[in-house]
Image (spheres, helix red, strand yellow):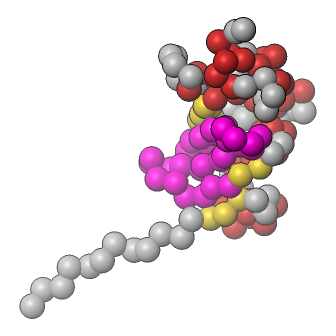
Amino acid sequence: MSDASTALGVRLYPDLVEHGGLAPALVETATRHGLDIGRVSAPDQGRSRFNCAELHSDQGVVCVKLGSQARYFMIDLRVSGEVLARGDVMDLLQVAQVAAAWRAGLAFTELTARFPFMEEIKHRPAPVAQVS
């Protein structure tokens, strides 16, 4: 059994095992559908090299991880390390579509309207110190 099949589980992610992990499968899916998802990276070592991917662009980072008990992809859109939107989806093509749309400059409100499985994270403003 290969390292990829051990890390991913052939039953849940046979397509990812076939490509050697999430990052190469995502690149292949985007290429096949003519989507520009930018630079894709994965950790160099450990199980994460098979089940995590980061897509880098001027907008920020799309971080993708896998569900372990059921097949789904967890997507975080991060700017300066802060998660601004997140969602879960079962189709790798939809992950690539989200990444391509965000890389192309789609605003969060438009992105969540186009991809209803994505949710914008509302952040509360930091409390302002009051001087007595």
User: Which residue in the rendered view is the most extreme toward the top?
Assistant: 1
Front residue of 5/126: it is: 5
Which residue is depicted at the point 60% across and 50% down?
A: 77
- Residue 119 on image: x %, y %: 66, 63
Q: Tell me if residue 103 comes above or below residue 39 in the rendering.
A: below
Q: Per the image, is 131 magenta? A: no
Front residue of 80/44: it is: 44
- Residue 126 on image: x %, y %: 34, 72
Q: Tell me if residue 107 comes above or below residue 6 in the rendering.
A: below
Which residue is depicted at the point 56% across and 22% down?
A: 47
| Total numbered labels | 0
- Residue 1 on image: x %, y %: 72, 8
Residue 11 falls in image quadrant:
top right
Can you see residue 104?
A: no
Which residue is depicted at the point 90% across and 33% down?
A: 33
By secondary structure, the bulk of the magenta-drawn segment is best described as strand
- Residue 8 on image: x %, y %: 69, 25
Magenta residues? 58-87
Residue 86 falls in image quadrant:
bottom right
- Image quadrant occupied by the C terminus: bottom left
